Image (tube, rainbow, N blue to C red):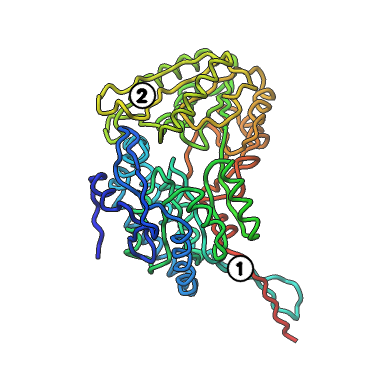
């Protein structure tokens, strides 16, 4: 039966109220418990999500394990065609999914949520086309022996996703895992469970039962049992460094592979010869102000050459001031909300710390005046200047609309400041000089480096960090081969 797009997100979340998706069916939590999910723009409950625990995990994993053998035995290109077909169908639901994620995450529909829904569909289409690349090698080991390698799936994959870009980050885990012949159990973020549940429901029109399952719940009660389950053979996690360490320790007990995409404190270097118009637009986009700064790759440390510093700051502040905060579902809104009260309090706490540390606070834009949004999790963007390099706001990930601008004199000083961080996820450099650009890309300690642009994660661009920003790569052929298959060596004696 075909699932038609529904453009009323309030109606959709009510239809998914209190449900997991296991073995192709929407089912309640086995313990009968649910938890409230709020609209962060209003503070009101939109629906309840099923509160999964170890029993739900065990059920979902057992179903996935049973389905995995038949799924792996299908020709790789057949699996790829089915995953690509999921991408085609999801393209028809872009508007629906964009509205859903705007409702539950607080991200503005026009600037963020609709774009994310489009990339979701593209990611499934992209990986579906890579199925033929699941190939091994022949090895010239001995003329009397035929020696070759094959790629085989790892089994059941546990995928744990965050709330900031749930659609994209689910896709870069689920799509390559499925194409490689694995089955997947997703644990959604407790703040944004419904849109990803809807995606999995839509995909059931194409996929065999049990191949893709999704649970909602909290980390200790649902995520922990998923990582620890004996039949989960691979974990892919995106989230905080602290939780990433917990996941890594649990996976180490079972000696299973883990992909970790963790935090960031990404630098943006603006050289004296940079195109100022492009650099300012890059700072606004790179800082993800329209996502309220809730991005691991946010360019939260902006390093500007002293010859451009004052003009850059003046123009940046003026531009951010024009961004409109408001209802995420309103087409005129540029900036939505922080995800929840706890995160809002954390961000506001860092803003207070920045002032206490002596930095100059520039508070921008304006809070919405609509009475219906009075209890929403809105925080005005803040750009700090006169920041000390060792200040907490310069070193710790805030995950909010807070940027620090620094002044530098020389290229070497800029590189040293950029690398002076425990994180190493992303970095950008803005210059017209080719030698400067190439030298910077070589010296910057980050896994995702761009010159004169600040793109978000895209299909076929290998994505992942170094240092505390994580382990492994995502969104590319490399991620499918290295993280969702294992290599088997076969030697046949011909004598």
The spot of residue 489 in percent (x, y) is 67, 71
Quadrant placement of the C terminus: bottom right
Q: Which residue is mark 1?
A: 136
The numbered mark, 2 or 1, whose residue comes first in the sequence reads: 1
The spot of residue 308 in percent (x, y) is 55, 16
The spot of residue 472 in percent (x, y) is 60, 50
The spot of residue 133 in percent (x, y) is 53, 64
Within 10 Å of the Cα at label 1, are there few (<14), some (14-19), or many (20+) other Cα atoms? some
The correct choice, above or below, for 188 with respect to 339 in the image is below
The correct choice, above or below, for 21 with respect to 440 in the image is below
- Which residue is painted at 43% across and 66% down in the image? 211
Helix, strand or loop under label 1: loop
- Which residue is painted at 38% across and 66% down in the image? 23
For the residue pair 285 and 166, the one nearer the viewer reads as 166
Q: Which residue is mark 2?
A: 323
Q: Rounded to the nearest whole Å, what is the CA distance between mark 2 and mark 1? A: 51 Å
Q: Is residue 50 left or right of residue 74?
A: left
User: For residue 288, which quarter of the picture?
Assistant: top left
């Amino acid at each position: 039966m075909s699932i038609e797009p529904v453009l009323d997100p309030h109606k959709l979340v009510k239809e998914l109220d209190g449900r997991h998706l296991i073995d192709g069916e929407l089912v309640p939590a086995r313990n009968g418990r649910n938890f409230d999910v709020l609209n962060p723009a209003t503070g009101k409950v939109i629906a309840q999500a099923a509160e999964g625990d170890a029993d739900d995990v065990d059920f979902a994993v057992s179903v996935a394990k049973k389905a995995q053998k038949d799924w792996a035995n299908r020709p790789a290109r057949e699996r790829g065609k089915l995953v690509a077909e999921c991408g085609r169908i999801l393209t028809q639901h872009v508007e629906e999914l964009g509205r859903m994620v705007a409702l539950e995450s607080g991200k503005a529909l026009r600037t963020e949520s609709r774009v994310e829904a489009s990339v979701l569909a593209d990611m499934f289409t992209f990986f579906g086309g890579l199925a033929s690349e699941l190939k091994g090698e022949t090895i010239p080991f001995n003329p009397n022996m035929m020696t070759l390698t094959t790629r085989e799936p790892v089994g059941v994959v546990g995928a744990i996703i965050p709330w900031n870009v749930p659609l994209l980050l689910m896709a870069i885990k689920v799509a390559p895992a499925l194409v490689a012949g694995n089955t997947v159990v997703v644990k959604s973020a407790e703040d944004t469970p419904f849109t990803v549940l809807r995606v999995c429901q839509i995909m059931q029109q194409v996929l065999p039962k049990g191949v893709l399952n999704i649970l909602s719940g909290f980390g200790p009660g649902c995520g922990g049992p998923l990582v620890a389950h004996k039949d989960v053979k691979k974990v892919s996690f995106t989230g905080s460094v602290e939780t990433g360490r917990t996941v890594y320790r649990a996976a180490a007990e079972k000696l299973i592979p883990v992909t970790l995409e963790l935090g960031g404190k990404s630098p943006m270097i603006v050289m004296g010869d940079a195109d100022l118009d492009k650099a300012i637009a890059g700072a606004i986009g790179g800082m993800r102000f329209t996502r309220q700064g809730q991005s691991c790759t946010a360019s939260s440390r902006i390093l500007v050459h002293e010859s451009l510093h004052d003009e850059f700051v003046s123009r940046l502040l003026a531009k951010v001031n024009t961004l409109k905060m408001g209802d995420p579902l309103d087409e005129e809104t540029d900036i939505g909300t922080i995800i929840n009260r706890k995160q809002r309090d954390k961000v506001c706490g860092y803003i207070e710390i920045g002032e206490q540390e002596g930095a100059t606070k520039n508070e921008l834009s304006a809070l919405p005046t609509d009475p219906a949004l009075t209890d929403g999790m809105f925080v005005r963007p803040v750009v700090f200047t006169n920041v000390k390099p060792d200040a907490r706001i310069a070193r710790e990930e805030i995950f909010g609309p807070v940027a620090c601008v620094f002044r530098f004199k020389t290229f070497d000083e800029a590189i040293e400041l950029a690398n002076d961080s425990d994180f190493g996820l992303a970095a950008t450099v803005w210059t017209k000089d080719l030698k400067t650009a190439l030298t910077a890309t070589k010296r910057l300690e980050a896994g995702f480096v761009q010159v004169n642009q600040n793109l978000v994660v895209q299909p076929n661009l290998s994505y992942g960090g170094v240092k505390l920003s994580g382990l492994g790569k995502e969104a590319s052929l490399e991620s499918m081969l290295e993280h969702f298959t294992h290599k088997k060596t076969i030697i046949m004696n011909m004598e």
